Image (cartoon, grey):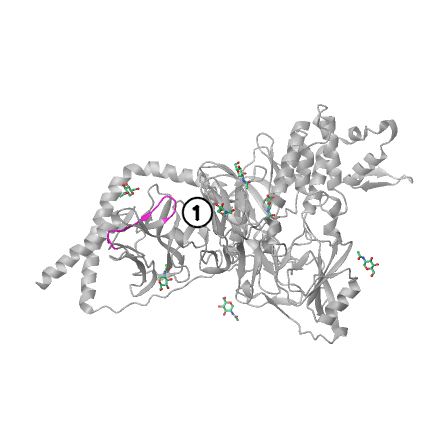
Amino acid sequence: MEFTAKYSSFVVLNLFFFLQLTSSAVHVLRQGSSLSVENPDDVLISASGIFSAGFYPVGENAYCFAVWFTKPCHDGSHTIVWIAHRDRPVNGKRSKLLILKTGNIILTDTAEYIIWSSNSTDSESWSRLILLDSGNLVLQTLKNVTVWQSFDSPTDTLLPEQPLTRYKRLVSARSQTDPSSGYYKLMYDDDNVLRLVFDGPETSSIYWPDSTVLDYNQGRNRYNDSRIAVFDSSGHFTSSDQVEFNSTDFGEGIWRRLTLDFDGNLRLYSLDEQKGIWSVTWQAMNKSCRIHGICGPNSICMYNLGSGPKCSCPPGFKMKNQTDWNYGCEPEYKLSCNDRDNIKFVKLNHVNFFGYHPSNLRNYTFEECKKACLDFCCVAFQYRYFPEDGAYRCYTKWELRNGYSYSSYNGVLYLKLPKSFPSEKPVEDFKLSCSSKQRKQIDIAYHKKIMPESLKILFWCASVIGMIEMICIFLVFSFLYKTQKSSDAATRGYLVAATGFKKFTYRELKMATRGFKEEIGRGGGGVVYKGVLPDQRIAAIKRLNVETIDQGEEEFLAEISTIGRLNHMNLIEMWGYCAEGKHRLLVYEYMESGSLKKNLMSNSLDWKQRYEIAVGTAKGLAYLHEECLEWILHCDVKPQNILLDSNYLPKVADFGLSKLLNRDNLNSSSFSRARGSRGYMAPEWVYNLPITSKVDVYSYGIVILEMLTGRNPAMGVPAVDTDGKVWHQSLEAWVKRKKHGAAGENSNSWVEELIDHAMGYDYDRNKLENLLEVAIKCTEADRHARPSMSQVVQMLLFDKNDP
Ligand SMILES: *[C@@H]1O[C@H](CO)[C@@H](O)[C@H](O)[C@H]1NC(C)=O
Ligand SMILES: *[C@@H]1O[C@H](CO)[C@@H](O)[C@H](O)[C@H]1NC(C)=O
Ligand SMILES: *[C@@H]1O[C@H](CO)[C@@H](O)[C@H](O)[C@H]1NC(C)=O
Ligand SMILES: *[C@@H]1O[C@H](CO)[C@@H](O)[C@H](O)[C@H]1NC(C)=O
Ligand SMILES: *[C@@H]1O[C@H](CO)[C@@H](O)[C@H](O)[C@H]1NC(C)=O
Ligand SMILES: *[C@@H]1O[C@H](CO)[C@@H](O)[C@H](O)[C@H]1NC(C)=O
Ligand SMILES: *[C@@H]1O[C@H](CO)[C@@H](O)[C@H](O)[C@H]1NC(C)=O
């Protein structure tokens, strides 16, 4: 009797095993059935396969029940759109999602605790759980009545046609790697206005719409109390308070999501399905550092493409909690308000702390403002010219919160510090150092339950039989799949090609370059070799000098993935990297025609090609500086770093490396002073002025002058002074002198006197003159007088001489 009971349980166990092995695509989950965390195949898939629901790993042995886009992104991660229980992940063992006979969905942790329940009931007890192609997870009765749906309890993301209504809210994730509830919320306020709110541990405030401007003046309507916001499949968003916008790629047929990101910005994303990349097609805050609370008290935020906002401490302050920026910074000094003789104010350019001043004091002189601050026992004051007042305003701060720094912000902050504060600390050119990435790992220890002895034996027997069964099944399957294998491999190769970015092993790259044989370039921290990748693509493989890198692998990867994500036809594409032991290699696309330098030296470029190179390079740099919403500085623009493809179209190379290299000789400044190349370096480097995107504009101007005149800027242009002494003037000075020297009937010939006749005589005189004028503007000694890169593009494309 006992024997048969045991035997039947074997059968059941093994049947279960078999079912789990084969049921890889579940479309409907009926009452009484469950999904288990232990079986990676226990995933509910929508009818067309676009969405999946199941247990998703969020940390070491920690899982959440979630809905995600089935197809992974280019970096292999999945885009999660909904989580059932974000603040309480479950154990990786024996946790389950069950649909009870009552119509309630419950989630258990280690089969012991119910940690989430849908609280739904179904009187007919025939309901089933389905994942719709809209991304909505619904519990439906036989009559298709929805008993419960995930769209009613959004996490941090809205999908097309998913409404946000009264009592519902989006709550951001805690960090990029931690999906638990963060501090930012999108919701309808009590006055019917849709707002973004920072609700931190100590303070809370509204940052969207701008709280310094009346809602009415920002087009918000307080009197429509239907409170509903939704965006449709063509990317059109509306809210009952009259917020309305279109995604920049307005139209049907694109997957989109509206996500309140962990950095507090609300962004609409569109999916490039081929490449597996989400791109931003609208965002609430163009300046993410204006988002409140992003760096904690006393710290300053600066936005960085890819890695998001970065925080840093002002001079005289240090990070409070080394692992968490939400704690901000704390002063290293104690200051008494009465001891005025021991106080000085240190100037921070382009820095502001939002709020926390009693009122703005208008038409104050600097001394009056300083006195007001001291009388008030402030911690800092902001002093700024307001053109509309024709005078300065003074803001005395009693706390430093919501700090941000933008190169375009022209206010100045005066920070109160003790007189003894060392003045050689960088102040004027104060730069933000990198924050440590928050990589909180949720760690749940699994406590084994002690099994009764008899159960143990049963378990072992079942396992052994299961094992034998598995081997049999494996043999059968491997036989069946053999025939399919070759086509599989082809698909995989295509996938890699489509997603682009890949990690290579050192061995692969050594083979690709045949032992680093064919050197094609040098500089920028390493030697570049030509190689052929396993998929037959020709690549340029850069081997970085190990001595110049003092980053750990993780930091290296963070920077690399930032660079790898940049995508523009005038920027070199990075295909992958290798970080193994001491080895650091970058794999780029190979450019047939070599560098601009090489082509200039061999006089092989005509006017048309040179003009296209000037425009393309400007577009590439403009993308780096501005179009990605914030800037990346190149810091080493020169003809060696502009590569030409088979059609002689340019691509800028070596960008983003200024961050990777030469970190050791910097203290709190993130840039080495000895950057750039002789002849192309902007005066800021020499005179210790703030380094902004204008250094690249300067170098670009020099490159254009070199391209048009054929003269090497590193050599200068020889000149003879009145005493007959020969000296060298700089290329840009020579060009400017020629231009200004031109007068009278010769006034037009200055262009002809300058240009490199190797480009031939078939040029457009107007365009050439315009290009020269642009280059001259770019090489102004005063960085404020230079145009931005996108203005350069405008000036070249909309030539004033064109009809
Ligand atoms: C279900 O009810 C419990 C107890 O009232 C509540 O804590 C929980 O948030 C509810 N679950 C959902 C998904 O609303
Ligand atoms: C319920 O929906 C399914 C799929 O959309 C459909 O095939 C079925 O006919 C519907 N049943 C009822 C009763 O409407
Ligand atoms: C209120 O908002 C809803 C949804 O956007 C809209 O349909 C309705 O017309 C609005 N009502 C008024 C009076 O504007
Ligand atoms: C969005 O695009 C549609 C179609 O082009 C247009 O009718 C509508 O006015 C646009 N809305 C906004 C807010 O730009
Ligand atoms: C953000 O920038 C985009 C593109 O430059 C612009 O269309 C939009 O109006 C800006 N949004 C805000 C809130 O300033
Ligand atoms: C620092 O932050 C971490 C993570 O939030 C926290 O666990 C730890 O207790 C904090 N340490 C101190 C000293 O506040
Ligand atoms: C600012 O104050 C000065 C002196 O008190 C006064 O002469 C000047 O008119 C004021 N300017 C404005 C714009 O109020």
State left or right for residue 430 relative to residue 150. Answer: right
Q: Position of residue 126 (x, y in %)?
A: 24, 51
Q: Nearer the viewer, residue 797 or 457?
A: 797
**Image point (84%, 29%), residue name:** 747
Would residue 98 appear left or right of 580 to someone viewing this image?
Answer: left
| Residue 386, x across and y down, in percent | 74, 54
- The residue that appears at 34% across and 58% down in the rendered structure is 118
Which residue position is annotated with label 1? 159
Residue 737 in sight = yes
The quadrant of the picture occupied by the C terminus is: top right
In this image, 446 relative to 259: left or right?
left
Q: Is residue 340 above or below residue 761?
A: below
Q: Main secondary structure of the magenta part?
A: loop
Q: Tell me the kind of residue under disc 1.
A: Leu
Identify the image quadrant of the N terminus.
bottom left
Q: Nearer the viewer, residue 796 or 122?
A: 122
Which structural element holds mark 1? Answer: loop
Q: Residue furthest front?
A: 223
Quadrant holding ligand 7?
A: bottom right
Per the image, is 424 magenta? no
Question: Is residue 470 visible to us here?
Answer: no
Q: In x, y percent, where is residue 119?
A: 33, 59
**Span colored in magenta:** 123-136
Q: Write the residue at 70% across / 75% down.
A: 336
